[in-house]
Image (cartoon, rainbow, N blue to C red):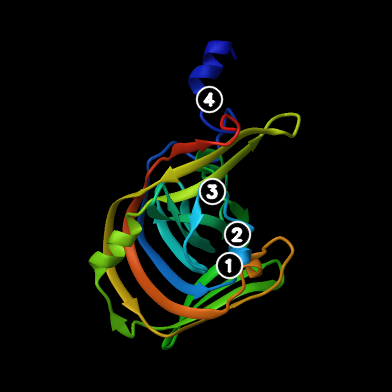
């Protein structure tokens, strides 16, 4: 293969059979369970990078079912998003993500810098309760439960919160093991259509695990829970801070 052919064909690894197709990526009937809880402020300070700023010791624990997404297929995800401010404006720092599908793991890490790792999250409807679980191998790492559609909430308010910016720390190593790319990336969800949103009582437990370390942000108090379904497009990112270029 000639040099100009490599340049023309190269999009993602492997060169001749990439792990995922080019964007855009559209998601249909994406189901969320988001349990907001209070944690320890020192635990947040240990994981949130500057120039992001923490305002409250709060974490949003998410279970997300994605039954139909272009390019990425059918999969489930679970992880933690930390409310932050950047240059005085609110957003969310994506701290951890665990999922069960190779294409979004590879694409999410390589394009945006999503902190994705392989595990086994699930969402199930068990009578009057929605159950979210996260397992790694034979071990349970997280379990969230929520009352099923106890009260309808304003879909417009949920949509507004989904349109806030999200932030990622993208890290790509050089061949000598040093960081080649070290950037704070901002992205937005686009063309969001919330099809229904509900709230209800909820509980959340996180368990110690060496690689799925969600329990490092311990649950001190469950504040609220939201269950909603939406269609959306995952927008591409922009670099807002280059850690290697800025002293």
Where residue 21 sits: x, y (%)? 46, 38
Helix, strand or loop at mark 2: helix
**Tag of residue 213:** none
Image quadrant where residue 159 sits: bottom left
Q: In this view, does 15 lie above or below 104?
A: above
- Dot 2, how many residues are within 10 Å of its Cα: few (below 14), some (14-19), or many (20+)? few
Q: How far apart are marks 3 and 2 (CA)?
A: 20 Å
- Dot 1, how many residues are within 10 Å of its Cα: few (below 14), some (14-19), or many (20+)? some
Residue drawn at 56 percent across, 58 percent down: 97
Residue drawn at 67 percent across, 64 percent down: 213
Assess whether mark 1 and mark 2 are in contact (beta carbons under 8 angstroms).
Answer: yes
- Dot 4, how many residues are within 10 Å of its Cα: few (below 14), some (14-19), or many (20+)? few
Assess whether mark 2 and mark 4 are in contact (beta carbons under 8 angstroms).
Answer: no
Q: Mark 3 sits on what residue?
A: 114
**Tag of residue 45:** 2
Which badge, 3 or 4, is on the more N-terminal residue? Answer: 4
Q: Distance between the residues labelled 3 and 1?
A: 23 Å
């Amino acid at each position: 293969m000639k040099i100009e052919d490599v340049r023309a064909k190269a999009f993602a690894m492997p060169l001749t059979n990439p792990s995922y197709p080019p964007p855009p990526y559209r998601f249909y009937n994406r189901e969320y369970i988001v349990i907001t809880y209070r944690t320890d402020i020192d635990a947040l300070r240990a994981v949130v990078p500057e120039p992001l700023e923490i305002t409250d010791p709060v974490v949003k624990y998410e279970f997300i079912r994605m039954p139909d997404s272009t390019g990425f297929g059918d999969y489930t995800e679970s992880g933690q998003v930390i409310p932050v401010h950047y240059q005085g404006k609110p957003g969310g720092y994506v701290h951890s993500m665990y999922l069960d599908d190779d294409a979004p793991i590879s694409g999410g890490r390589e394009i945006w810098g999503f902190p994705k790792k392989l595990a086994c999250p699930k969402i199930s409807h068990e009578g009057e309760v929605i159950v979210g679980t996260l397992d790694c191998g034979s071990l349970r790492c997280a379990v969230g439960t929520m009352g099923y559609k106890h009260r309808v909430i304003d879909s417009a308010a949920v949509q507004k919160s989904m349109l806030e910016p999200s932030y990622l720390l993208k890290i790509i190593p050089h061949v000598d093991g040093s960081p080649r790319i070290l950037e704070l990336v901002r992205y937005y969800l686009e063309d969001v259509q919330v099809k229904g949103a509900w709230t209800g009582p909820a509980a959340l437990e996180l368990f110690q695990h060496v690689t799925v370390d969600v329990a490092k942000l311990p649950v001190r108090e469950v504040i609220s829970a939201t269950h909603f379904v939406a269609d959306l497009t995952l927008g591409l990112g922009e670099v807002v801070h280059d850690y290697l270029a800025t002293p």
